[in-house]
Amino acid sequence: MKEKNKKPYLPLSLVMKEKGKTTKDLADLLAVSISEVDKKLNGEIEWELTEVKKVCNYFDMSAARLFTWN
């Protein structure tokens, strides 16, 4: 169960901030709209496996880091 007001993909958001990337950059990478990226980051819609793979390769991070708070 998700905790209220806790963004499920906060680790990705933090990495994006560290690297100076925006939701527009992520939308361009995934070839989707900015609003769709926002929905994905907020856990409103599911990520496709190919999208997870692209994000992990682009940011040089593991899928485990993408989905964990540690």
Image (cartoon, rainbow, N blue to C red):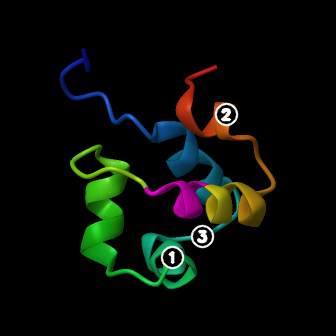
The numbered mark at residue 15 is none
In contact (CB < 8 Å): disc 1 and disc 2: no
Residue 56: percent from left, percent from top: 70, 54
Q: Residues within 10 Å of mark 2 (few under 14, many from 20)?
A: some
Give left or right: position of 54 versus 51. right
Q: Amino acid at mark 1?
A: Leu
Q: Look at the numbered disc 3 and give the secondary structure of its residue.
A: loop
Mark positioned earlier in the residue sequence (1 or 3): 3
Residue positioned 53% across, 54% down in the render: 49
Q: Which of these two is toward me, 67 or 4? A: 67
**Nearest to viewer (mark 1 / mark 3):** 1
Q: Is residue 40 above or below residue 5?
A: below
Residue positioned 81% across, 55% down in the render: 60
How many labels, in total?
Answer: 3
Mark positioned earlier in the residue sequence (2 or 3): 3
Q: Amino acid at mark 3?
A: Lys
Residue 7: percent from left, percent from top: 34, 36
Q: Amino acid at mark 2?
A: Arg
The numbered mark at residue 65 is 2
Marks 1 and 3, how far apart at CA: 13 Å
Mark positioned earlier in the residue sequence (1 or 2): 1
Which residue is disc 1 drawn over?
30
Which residue is disc 3 drawn over?
21
Marks 1 and 2, how far apart at CA: 19 Å
Q: Residues within 10 Å of mark 1 (few under 14, many from 20)?
A: some
Which segment is the magenta one? 48-52
Give left or right: position of 51 versus 56. left
Q: Is residue 13 above or below residue 67?
A: below
Marks 2 and 3, how far apart at CA: 17 Å
